[in-house]
Image (tube, rainbow, N blue to C red):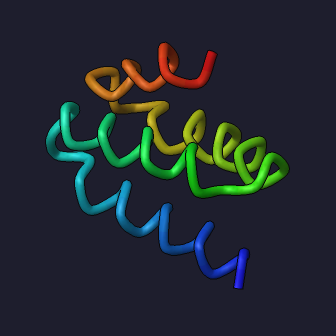
Amino acid sequence: MARAMFEYTKTVLRKVSFNSDLFCKELEKSLQRLLPYEIQELIIWLKEFTANKPELYVYTNLIK
């Protein structure tokens, strides 16, 4: 079940990546729902996903 939440989070973040405000809101929600090790995996995924999307770099403030 926990793995399903992680995959769902990635799907939602991909779908809202057109809007940085929405992206941040969804990311905040996911940080509350995911398990600590899933958050670490999400950070790795975010670095790869936002590599060519500088408008989404605002997530770095949320992670710290």
* Residue 50, quarter of the rendered image: top left
* Residue 4, quarter of the rendered image: bottom right
Quick check: 23 above or below 10?
A: above
Q: Nearer the viewer, residue 52 or 42?
A: 42
Q: Nearer the viewer, residue 61 or 53?
A: 61
Pinpoint residue 38: horizontal percent, then vertical percent. 75, 54
Quick check: 46 above or below 37?
A: above
* Residue displayed at 16% across by 46% down: 18
* Residue displayed at 22% across by 32% down: 20
Quadrant (top left/top right/bottom left/bottom right) for the N terminus: bottom right
* Residue displayed at 58% across by 56% down: 33
* Residue displayed at 72% across by 76% down: 3
Pinpoint residue 57: horizontal percent, then vertical percent. 40, 21
Pinpoint residue 61: horizontal percent, then vertical percent. 48, 14
Task: List the single residue furthest toward the front.
Answer: 32
- Image position of 35 (left or right of 56): right
